[in-house]
Amino acid sequence: MGKVLDITPRLRSQNSLENKKIEVRADVLDITEARQEILSRDRRDVKRTILTEFVGAFVVLPEKGLLKAALYDISENGLAFDLELAEGGFAAGDEVAMRVYLNHSTYFPFTITVSNSRAIEDEGVVRHGAGFVKGTMNDVALHHFVKFIENVSASLKTDSGDVLVSHIS
């Protein structure tokens, strides 16, 4: 017969290594801030376009007239607008007629439902978030208007007055 190898000492040695507790130290990272950033970024399901002073906007106050509003941003589902702090604001749930003026006499009318409002003291405004009222005759036009604003605002340039001509001879 051949020689028999005794592997018992090797097995004991291996088992004793496996039975030892291995202590690993690692820093614990707080991912709360990163998680909140991701959630807030993912919470908005549509692209919004910032509009400060791009077009003239007014809210229609029945029996009072038009009140100037500054469009803040717009998306396919709604918009945000500011009213002067002194003018007050609308409450959540208020249905408001709005006009966006393309020039001094031509406007685009639509209706919104206010979803939230908050005073921004340092800017002197009350910012409102609102959704478009769906099922109106302006739904298709409103969709195209929002797409127009998104596309145009992506390529806007600021005029610094460097290309003015004083006269032509």
Image: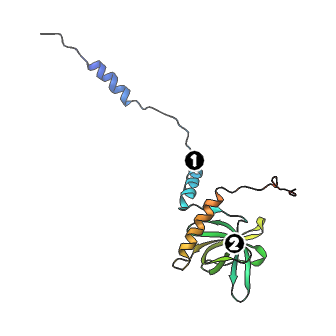
Residue drawn at (34%, 22%), measured in percent from left and top?
13
Position above or below: 5 against 121? above
Q: Residue at x 65, y 69 (%)?
A: 80
Tell me if label 2 and label 1 are in contact, CB under 8 Å: no
Mark 2: secondary structure? loop
The residue tagged 2 is 102
Q: Quadrant of the C terminus?
A: bottom right
Colour convention of the picture: rainbow
Image spot of residue 65 (x, y percent): 73, 85
- Report x, y in % for residue 85: 76, 73
Residue shown at 63% from the left, 61% from the top: 49
Amino acid type, mark 2: Leu
Crowding at dot 2, Cα within 10 Å, few <14 / some 14-19 / many 20+, comes out as few
In the rendered structure, find residue 30 and report the number of the disc placed on it.
Answer: 1
In-image side of 120 versus 97 (left or right): right
x and y, in percent, of residue 88 in the image: 74, 78
